Image (spheres, rainbow, N blue to C red):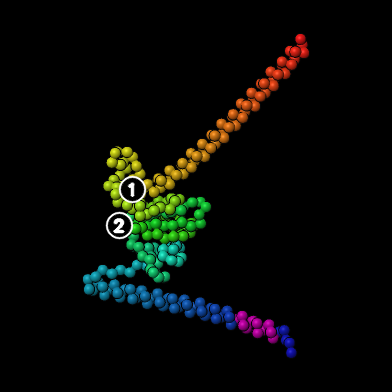
Amino acid sequence: MYDPDELDEEQRERQLRKKLNEMYLIEFHFLVDSCFRRRFKEFCKKMERVAKHHRFHLEFDIPYRDLGFHGVPNREMVLIQPTVRCLVNLTETPFFLVELDRVEHIHFERCTFRSKNFDMIIILQNFDVLPLSINAVPMNELDAIQEWLTDCSITYTAGQASMSWKSVMNLVKGDPRFYEETDEHGESKPAGWQFLQADDNHDGNEEEDDGDEDYSAGDDDDEDEDEEDEDEEEDDEEDVNGDDDEVGV
């Protein structure tokens, strides 16, 4: 026999069991995570003591999750996190690790107001090694990355175009006055990596100049049309005056 009250009671019991199971799982994962973290910290401290006992220097570094950002260093989108001395992703293979002491400069490619993401190019101090790239970084994370680089005293530039980095590195290696403000002839030039941003600004200025030329050309056409209209009005007035003279005679 159909009993609405009994069905409602069963429904409430199922919902209560589901809620209790969810709370249990959350608490279980929290305890496991806390236990793992505590045991891992103990393991790190033991390893540091053993290394110190054998006169080795070993120090574990902890990633700063709050400073992390998403990008594609290899094949898929991952969370990349800074540490005190490195920039790493250790959750997906192949692992990504860059020592900050070996970073020379950072350049951001495809930085425009319309872009949803950009590419982060990591130039190493060893110019014989091609720069590393982290692709498809969300544009809303750019400010936080730049602030972190400033705190780390790492220089950076940004541009709209994608660079051929093999050619760029060959150019840099072949320039003995790369970090100077003048070239071998004494003429001024951007010092160091500022040429990456200078080239981009130069392209933007050229586009603005083209726009000014188009505007000027349009103004000239309008002026020519106005002069033609004035000439036609003067001719019409002369014709009317001539007709009046004939009538008077």
Q: Is residue 9 magenta?
A: yes
Determine which quarter of the picture holds residue 82: bottom left
Q: CA distance from mark 1 to mark 2?
A: 17 Å
Residue 202 lies, in percent from the top left, at 43, 43
Give whichever of discs 1 and 2 has the lower sequence position: 2
Residue at horizontal 22 percent and vertical 71 percent from the top: 55
Q: Is residue 179 above or below residue 217?
A: below
Query: Secondary structure beneath disc 1?
Result: loop
Tell me if 146 is positioned left or right of 235 in this view.
left
| In the image, residue 91 lies in the stretch drawn in magenta | no
Instruction: Pick the residue in front: 146 or 3.
Output: 146
| Vertical position of residue 141 compared to residue 199: above or below | below
Above or below for 215 versus 162: above
Work out whether residue 5 or residue 200 is closer to the camera in this orientation and state it: 200
Depth check: give the residue in front, 176 or 46. 176
The residue singled out by tag 1 in the image is 192
Q: Residue 212 appears at what percent x and percent y?
A: 51, 37
* Residue 151 makes an appearance in the image: no
Q: Mark 1: which amino acid?
A: Gly
Highlighted range, magenta: 6-16
Residue 220 spot, x, y in % from top left: 56, 31
**Majority SS type along the magenta span:** helix
Q: Residue at x 31, y 41 (%)?
A: 182
Hey, which quadrant is residue 76 in on the image? bottom left
Image quadrant occupied by the C terminus: top right
Pointer 1 local density, CA inside 10 Å: few below 14, some 14–19, many at least 20: some
Q: Amino acid at mark 2?
A: Asp
Q: Is residue 124 visible?
A: yes
Q: Helix or strand or loop: what does disc 2 sit on? A: loop
Residue position marked by numbered label 2 in the rendering = 128
